[in-house]
């Protein structure tokens, strides 16, 4: 809850490109994950943040965990595809696609 509240402020202030802020929220989400590894909202936000931080391997692990919990969720499927494309070819187009996807999710949700 603390991580999501902090993230709501970050999004509201439009400072989601601040790497220090991203990492501080990741730390909170990792703590939450230790307490409940199956908390989908935390895993969703964690995967978004890791994608934004170019932590592809870690993001893929989280997305894979999400797909075990919710195998038919198209959001998780889309994330996996984006990460796979990035891991195959880390070009500007694929990096831009990830950034655009994540930013659209952050600015388009009211679930903070």
Image: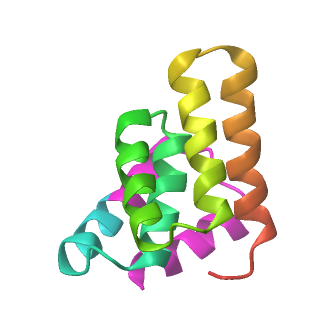
Horizontal side of 105 relative to 4 (left or right) equals right
93, above or below 100, in the image: above
Which quadrant of the rendered structure holds the N terminus?
A: bottom left
Q: Position of residue 34 (x, y in %)?
A: 18, 72
Q: Residue at x 78, y 55 (%)?
A: 104
Q: Can residue 110 be seen in this view?
A: yes
Q: Which of 12 and 57 is in front in this view?
A: 57
Which quadrant of the rendered structure holds the C terminus?
A: bottom right
Q: Nearer the viewer, residue 110 or 78?
A: 78
Q: Position of residue 76 (x, y in %)?
A: 58, 59
Q: Residue at x 55, y 69 (%)?
A: 7
Residue found at the very far front of the displayed protein = 72
Q: Nearer the viewer, residue 13 or 59?
A: 59
Q: Which residue is drawn at 42% across and 44% down?
A: 60
Q: Residue at x 35, y 48 (%)?
A: 61
Segment colored magenta: 1-26
């Amino acid at each position: 809850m603390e991580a999501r509240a902090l993230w709501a402020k970050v999004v509201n202030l439009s400072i989601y490109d601040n790497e220090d802020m991203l990492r501080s929220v990741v730390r909170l989400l990792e703590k939450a994950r230790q307490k409940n590894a199956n908390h989908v909202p935390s895993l969703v936000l964690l995967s978004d943040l890791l994608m934004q931080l170019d932590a592809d391997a870690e993001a893929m692990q989280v997305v894979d965990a999400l797909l075990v919990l919710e195998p038919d969720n198209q959001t998780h499927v889309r994330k996996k595809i984006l990460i796979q494309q990035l891991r195959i070819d880390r070009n500007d187009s694929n990096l831009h696609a990830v950034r655009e996807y994540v930013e659209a999710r952050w600015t388009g949700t009211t679930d903070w």
